[in-house]
């Protein structure tokens, strides 16, 4: 781990060329939503891979935030209630977006515009909120995240 890296409890993936960091409380569904995005993108012929699940190491390289993983969890994702699955993974990826996993009853109906996810001492990412029970999180990303539609093969 780089001395300047921050350990975030979350899940980081890559869809096409876009890096996504899923955040939220323990048990909120970060891993399952990230896994659903990976599976959906692959079914549609797009590149998709896991960077890290549970522990994501975030560092700054120039103007870009970079996610990496501890080698002990390389290629492993916990699918709560089902077990640990092995998936294609990358050791590191640039991040473009943070997704906060929310439960609807406790959440605002419409989030603030231009929300940001702050990583202390490192920087910020644009933030999008996705309901933990959404049936197609990749479609939500394509509809709401600037620049993501061109990455999606639909």
Image: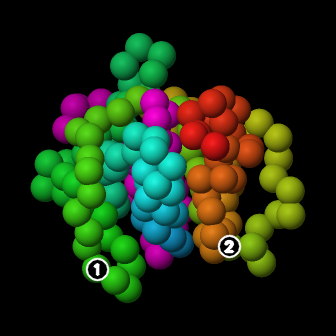
**Residue 149 picture location, percent across and down:** 66, 36
- At x 35% / y 33%, what residue is drawn? 93
* Magenta-drawn segment: 1-27
Residue 109 seen: yes
Looking at this rendering, what residue extends furthest in the top direction? 62
The colour scheme applied to this rendered structure is rainbow
Is 144 situated left or right of 15 in this image?
right
Is 35 situated left or right of 51 in this image?
right
Q: Which mark is residue 139?
A: none
Looking at this rendering, what residue extends furthest in the bottom direction? 81
Q: Quadrant of the N terminus?
A: top left
Q: Regarding mark 2 in the picture, which secondary structure is present there?
A: loop
- At x 82% / y 41%, what residue is drawn? 113
- At x 51% / y 70%, what residue is drawn? 29
Q: How many neighbours does mark 2 have within 10 angstroms: few (below 14), some (14-19), or many (20 or more)?
A: some
Is-magenta flag for residue 2? yes
Q: Give the CA separation, mark 2 to mark 1.
A: 23 Å
Looking at this rendering, what residue extends furthest in the left direction? 72
**Residue 34 picture location, percent across and down:** 47, 58
Q: Regarding mark 1 in the picture, which secondary structure is present there?
A: strand
The residue indicated by pointer 1 is: 83
Is 67 situated left or right of 36 in this image?
left
Is-magenta flag for residue 59? no
The residue indicated by pointer 2 is: 103
- At x 46% / y 35%, what residue is drawn? 16
**Earlier sequence position, callout 2 versus callout 1:** 1
Name the one closer to the observer, 37 or 105.
37
**Residue 102 picture location, percent across and down:** 65, 66
């Amino acid at each position: 781990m780089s001395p300047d890296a921050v350990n975030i409890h979350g899940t980081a993936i890559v869809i096409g060329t876009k890096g996504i960091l899923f955040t939220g409380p323990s048990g909120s569904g970060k891993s399952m939503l990230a896994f659903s995005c990976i599976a959906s993108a692959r079914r549609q012929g797009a590149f998709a891979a896991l960077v890290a699940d549970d522990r994501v190491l975030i560092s700054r390289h120039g103007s870009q935030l970079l996610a990496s993983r501890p080698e002990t969890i390389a290629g492993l994702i916990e699918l709560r209630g089902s077990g640990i699955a092995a998936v294609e993974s990358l050791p590191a990826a640039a991040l473009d977006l943070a997704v906060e996993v929310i439960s609807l009853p406790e959440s605002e109906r419409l989030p603030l515009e231009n929300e940001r996810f702050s990583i202390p001492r490192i920087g910020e990412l644009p933030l999008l909120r996705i309901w933990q029970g959404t049936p197609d999180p990749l479609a939500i990303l394509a509809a709401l995240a600037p620049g993501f539609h061109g990455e999606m093969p639909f």
